[in-house]
Structure formats: C-alpha cells, structure tokens
Image: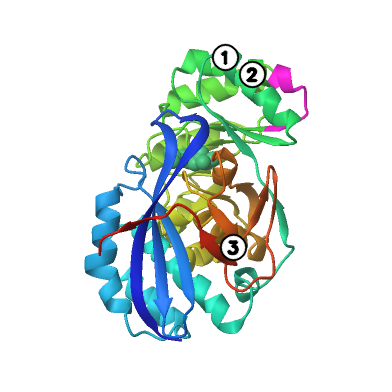
Amino acid sequence: MKITDIKLGMLRVPLKTPFKTALRTVEAVEDIVVCIHTDTGHVGYGEAPATAVITGDTHGSIVEAIRKFIAPRLIGQEVANLNRITQLIQEALEKNTSAKAAVEIAVYDLFGQLYGAPLYKMLGGGDPVITTDITISVDYIDKMVADSISAVERGFESLKIKVGKDIGVDVERVKAIYAAVEGRALLRLDANQGWTAKQAVHAITLLEDAGVRLELVEQPVKAQDLDGMKYVTERVHTPIMADESVFGPTEVIELIRMRAADIINIKLMKTGGLSNAVRIADIAALYGMECMIGCMLESSISVAAAVHLAVAKANAITRVDLDGPSLCAFNPVDGGVIFNESEISVTDAPGLGIREIRGLEPLPY
Ligand SMILES: C[C@H](N)C(=O)N[C@@H](CCC(=O)O)C(=O)O
Ligand SMILES: [Mg+2]
C-alpha cells in the first residue's frame, strides 16, 4: 500500500453552546481534514484544529506545513513502513504540531487498514470502552451551576470546570457547583494558565479548607512557568496536572525530573500525533506518572485516534477528557468511534473505521 495523494478539506461543525475558557471563546469546530489516498484505493483520515492560543497553529500554517513540507515527503512511501513515515513527518519542519498530528493520524488509520485491524489493536489492544468527562465553560455562576446539573443528569460522572478568569469569582464558582452536584460527579478544574502561582495556591487552599474535594487542577499558571507549576504542586494536596506546559516527550522528561506536576495531559495536537503520544505514555508509565488524554475543539475524526490510544495505553492514561464530539451540534462522520455522551466505544473496523465525512469543503491543493 503506497501513498499516492494527500487532499485537504475544511470541516465546519457548530458547537451546541459557546465554549469559553480563560484563553478564548469558540462557537464552532473549524478544522482542517487530511485525506491520504493510496494506490490500493484506501483513504486514511486525520484532522487538525487551529488552536493558535495554545499550539500557535492557524488554518494557514496547518495547510502550508502540510502542502509545502510534509506531503511532498510522503508521496510514494509504503504505509507498512510506519516508523519511517512518522520520522519523515516529525522531521519535515519544526513545531507545527497540529499539522503533524493530522497527517500522522491519517497514516496510522491506513496502517490499521493495511493489516485489517482496528488502531487500538495495532497499538497493543485493550478494553474497548472508556468514559469521558465534559467541559463546563467559564461563565456566570448560575449558568455554570445549571450546566453542571444538566451534565450530571446526562450521565457525566466527571466535570471539567473552566476557571482562571477572576480568582475571587473562581472560588465561588467551584463552591457553588460542588454544592449543587452533591457528590454525583468528580470535579476537575482547568485554569488554562489564568492564575499566578501564589493565586493558585491561595485559591486551591481556600477550596481544600472549605471541604471542596477536587480530583485535580489543570494548568494553573502560564505554560512556560515550570517553576510556578512546581511551586503549586508542592504546596497543595490536590493533584496538579500540566497541560499547556508540556507538548512533547522531552518536555515531559523535564517536568518529571523537576517534579513540577502530578499528572500530564497528553493531546495529539501538542505531541504532533500518535508516535510521540505513545512515547509520552510509555515514559509516564516508566516513572509511575499518570496521564489524562485530552483534545482541543476537534470532531470525531481526530478524537477517534485519541480514543484508540487511550484504550491501548490504559496503563498510563487513567483519565479521559475527550468531549470534543459531545460538544458538537452533530457528528459529521459515518463509522468510526461511537460517542454516546460519557461512554465512548471503539469498534473492530480496520484503522479508525471512518467510512465517510459529510460536509467537507475541499481546499485547493
Ligand atoms: C475540549 C477539552 N475539554 C478542553 O478543554 N481542551 C483544552 C482547551 C481547548 C481549546 O481551547 O480548544 C484544554 O485546555 O484542556
Ligand atoms: Mg487544559
């Protein structure tokens, strides 16, 4: 099976409600879709969101990176040579992790199709059902309480509460939600870099002293402030998770060496795809560090790849934040992973199992 062509498209799917974090507000998934064609008539699919405020990637940079740097290296490559192809992708250019992720995902999809096996089995196999949390956007307290109750009623047992907007209100937000859900869901906070280290320790300690039990707090301080991450991790009981602070395996090794966090959030759009995500999960397992698997605003194309990884690497990936498809107003994909609110299941269809993507707008090559 040889790669013969790489086509790009734009996918637009409105969100059910606006997604609001300390970094941005978004109303729709608007992602670049990669379709890799082969001489055998197979097609592998990948997807990349333009999360400029986190990865630095824009629609323009994703398209340019794939067209000018990555795609020319892949034409003619045998899909069976997966490791060679992932190396070609990773070494095609610096950074541009979302573009690399989209192409890698499509190649892994083809790799599964080549051997007639679902991706999770190609990655080592595992239990085909996982459970995700759902994000509660940062907003007025009453709205966040109502959204949390509604999520619990929909069956979500874990809520990812966005904070980091205003430290005083943040503490009140979390107390109000904690009281409203009455132990029916675990609460994870994500400050998306919105606090300083001292503010984070203050807010988390206030919550701990008030008896609010939190599962974890994600990325309390600026991405580059690893000393700040360490400062917070050392001073609170609640586990601290690194998200924007760690992209690839070398950063994870440094974070573990510094003991700057308790948990790592792996996202394919930060790692540049599955090859580095597998490395991170293996490094974490080696050091007894737990991981969450997360996503950006992505549909069920690229999130499917993250699900297959989570199933196969359950030894290291103990928490799941793959709510992208649940936040979308509709699923543009036929086949693939089954997203049913908090329950996500892989099937045994080869690769990612995607049969068709509806509403894809072709981008000129
Ligand atoms: C969607 C997911 N639950 C999430 O919160 N992901 C990111 C933010 C994604 C974005 O801004 O596109 C996170 O910070 O964990
Ligand atoms: Mg985060």
What is the secondary structure assignment of the residue under circle 1? Answer: helix
Q: Quadrant of residue 124?
A: bottom right
From what the image shows, is residue 199 above or below residue 23?
Answer: above
Mark 2: which secondary structure? helix
| Residue at the (72%, 62%) spot, across then down | 128
Placement of 117 over or under 68, stated as above or below? below
Q: Are marks 1 and 2 in contact (CB under 8 Å)?
A: yes
Most foreground residue, 211 or 119: 119
Q: Residues within 10 Å of mark 3 (few under 14, many from 20)?
A: many
Q: Which quarter of the figure is the C terminus placed in?
A: bottom left
Which comes sooner in the sequence, label 3 or label 1? Answer: 1
- Distance from Cα at disc 1 to Cα at disc 2: 6 Å
Disc 2 target residue = 145
Residue at which label 1 appears: 141
Q: Look at mark 3 in the image and give the residue it sits on.
A: 309
When the figure is inspected, residue 340 is found, relative to residue 104, above or below; the finding is above
Instruction: Indicate the quadrant where residue 183 lies.
Output: top right
Q: Is residue 27 visible?
A: yes
| Magenta region, residue range | 178-186
**Residue 75 shown left or right of residue 227 in the figure:** left
**Is the residue at mark 2 in contact range of ligand 1, meaning its CB lies under 8 Å from it?**
no
How far, Cα to Cα, is label 3 from label 2? Answer: 32 Å
Residue type pointed to by label 1: Ile
